[in-house]
Image (tube, rainbow, N blue to C red):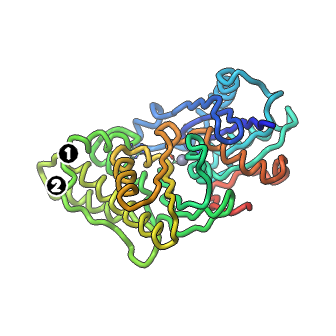
C-alpha cells in the first residue's frame, strides 16, 4: 500500500512543506524563502528567521496539501528536520510537526537535515539505492559519507572550519555581491577565467576532512593587495579552487572505498560548474554521479519527506514517538 508522508523543513531560512508518496514521488513541494529579509545583512539573522517561520509554516503546509490534492486523512506519517540548524528555526518546525501528529493521530519521524540532502537524489532516480559515496556540500556542511544501506552511514570527514557554501557566501560578501553568495559567484564565474588567479587548493592530505577558511583568507588578501580587480576572474578562480578540492577528495574516496556511485547534495551542488565537472569526471573515470535537480539541492521539505519515508518503513510503519526535541548540533547517526 502506498505511504504518503508530510515533510516539514525549517532548519535555516527556508520554510518548506512537501507531500511525498513512497519516498520518491513528490506530490507537492512548497518552499517559502526568506532571502529578501536576510539579504541586507549578507547572512541569516536567527531571530528574524524564526519569526518568519512562525508566520509562514501553516501557510506552506496548507499549500502543500492543496497542491497535492490531499488531506490529513491520507497521510501515513509526518517527518520533520530535528537538526542540525538554528535552534529557533528548528523549534518552529518541530513544534508544528509534533502538534499536527498529536491532533491527527499520525506517527512522527525525525530526520537529520543532512540525511535529507543525502536522500534528495532518490526522488528523481528510482533505480538509485545504497551503497554509494555521498558528498554533502551546503551552507553549514562539507561532508563525505559512505551510505552502506538506508540509514547505515560511515562518516569519512567533514569541514574543520568554513563549509563550502559558507566560503561562497563570505567571498560574495567581500565582493559586495548579493546574499546568498553561491548563485552570484556561479553567475559571475561564467564570464571569468578560472585560471586567472592561482588560489590554493586546501587538500589536507591524509585525512578526508575539508578546510576552506585558508582559501577564503587568500581571496581576502588578494582583494587587499590588488587595486584593480576583475570580479568575474576572481569569482571563477575561487570557484574552481573549491570545485577542484571537492572533486579531488570525492573521487579519491570513491576509488579507495570501491564505490561505483557518487551522490552529491546540498545547496552548493546547485553550482553549474560543479555539476558539469562532477558529471564529466565521473564519466571519464567510470563512476555514476548523481545530482538532484537544482530545486532539490537547496533546502526543501521533499527531501525530508523522502528520508522520513525510508526511516518510517524501517521502523515498521511506526514513528519514533517520545524522543522529539530539536538538536541544533545534530550529527549524522545510523538508525539501521
Ligand atoms: O543546503 P542549503 O540550501 O542550506 C544549508 O543547509 O546550509 O545550502 C545553502 C548554501 C549557501 O551557502 C549558498 O550560497 C549555496 O548553498 N549555494 C550555492 C549555489 N546555490 C546555493 N553555492 C554555489 N553555487 C550555487 N549555484
Ligand atoms: Zn541544507
32 over 170 or under it: above or below: above
Mark 1: give few (<14), some (14-19) or many (20+) Cα within 10 Å: some
Q: Which of 170 and 262 is in front in this view?
A: 262
User: Horizontal and vertical percent for residue 254?
Assistant: 47, 66
Q: Nearer the viewer, residue 287 or 293?
A: 287
Q: Quadrant of the C terminus?
A: bottom right
**What secondary structure is marked by label 1?**
loop
Q: Mark 2 packing: few (<14 Cα in 10 Å), some, or many (20+)?
A: some
Residue 80's quadrant in the figure? top right
Whole-angstrom CA distance, mark 2 to mark 1, is: 8 Å
Q: Which of the labelled discs sits on residue 28, or is there none?
A: none
Q: In this view, does 211 lie to the left or right of 12?
A: left
Which residue does the image show at 35% across and 52% down from the upper left?
A: 280
Outermost residue, left side = 228
The reply to whether discs 2 and 1 touch (Cβ–Cβ < 8 Å) is yes
Horizontal and vertical percent position of residue 23: 68, 42
Q: Does the residue labelled 2 lie within 8 Å of ligand 1?
A: no
Total numbered labels: 2
With 222 as the anchor, is 16 left or right in this view? Answer: right
Q: Which residue is drawn at 55% across and 63% down?
A: 145
The verdict on label 1 being within 8 Å of ligand 1 is no
Give the residue displayed 46% in from the left and 37% down from the top.
Answer: 38
Residue 91 spot, x, y in % from top left: 69, 44
Of all residues, the one furthest to the bottom in this rendering is 206
> Which quarter shows the N terminus?
top right
| Lateral position of residue 1 relative to residue 63, left or right | right
For disc 2, the marked residue is 196
| Residue 158 visible (yes or no) | yes
* Mark seen at residue 192: 1
Residue 260 percent location from the top left of the image: 50, 62
Mark 2 lies on a secondary structure that is: loop
Amino acid at each position: 500500500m502506498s505511504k504518503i508522508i508530510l515533510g516539514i523543513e525549517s532548519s535555516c531560512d527556508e520554510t518548506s512543506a512537501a507531500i511525498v508518496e513512497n519516498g520518491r514521488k513528490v506530490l507537492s513541494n512548497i518552499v517559502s524563502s526568506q532571502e529578501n529579509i536576510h539579504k541586507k545583512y549578507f547572512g541569516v539573522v536567527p531571530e528574524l528567521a524564526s519569526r518568519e517561520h512562525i508566520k509562514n509554516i501553516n501557510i506552506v503546509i496548507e499549500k502543500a496539501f492543496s497542491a497535492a490534492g490531499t488531506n490529513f486523512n491520507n497521510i501515513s506519517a509526518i517527518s520533520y528536520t530535528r537538526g542540525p540548524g538554528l535552534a529557533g528555526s528548528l523549534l518552529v518546525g518541530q513544534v508544528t510537526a509534533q502538534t499536527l501528529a498529536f491532533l491527527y493521530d499520525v506517527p512522527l519521524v525525525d530526520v537529520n537535515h543532512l540525511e535529507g540532502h543525502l536522500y534528495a537524489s532518490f526522488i528523481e532516480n528510482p533505480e538509485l539505492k545504497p551503497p554509494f559515496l555521498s558528498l554533502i556540500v551546503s551552507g553549514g556542511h562539507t561532508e563525505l559519507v559512505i551510505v552502506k544501506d538506508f540509514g547505515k552511514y560511515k562518516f569519512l570527514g567533514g569541514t574543520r572550519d568554513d563549509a563550502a557554501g559558507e566560503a561562497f557566501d563570505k567571498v560574495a560578501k567581500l565582493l559586495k555581491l548579493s546574499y546568498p553568495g553561491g548563485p552570484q559567484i556561479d553567475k559571475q564565474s561564467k564570464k571569468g577565467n578560472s585560471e586567472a588567479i592561482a588560489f590554493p587548493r586546501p587538500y589536507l592530505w591524509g585525512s578526508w576532512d575539508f578546510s576552506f577558511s585558508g582559501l577564503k583568507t587568500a581571496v581576502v588578501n588578494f582583494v587587499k593587495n590588488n587595486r584593480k580587480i576583475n570580479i568575474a576572474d576572481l569569482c571563477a578562480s575561487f570557484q574552481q579552487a573549491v570545485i577542484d578540492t571537492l572533486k579531488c577528495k570525492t573521487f579519491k574516496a570513491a576509488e579507495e572505498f570501491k564505490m561505483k556511485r557518487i551522490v552529491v547534495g546540498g545547496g552548493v551542488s546547485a553550482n553549474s560548474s560543479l555539476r558539469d565537472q562532477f558529471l564529466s569526471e565521473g564519466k571519464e573515470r567510470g563512476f555514476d554521479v548523481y545530482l538532484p535537480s537544482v530545486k532539490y539541492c537547496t533546502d526543501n521539505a521533499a527531501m525530508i519527506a523522502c528520508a522520513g519515508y525510508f526511516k518510517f518503513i524501517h521502523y515498521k510503519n511506526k514513528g519514533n514517538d517520545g524522543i522529539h526535541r530539536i538538536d541544533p548540533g545534530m550529527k549524522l547517526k545510523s538508525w539501521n
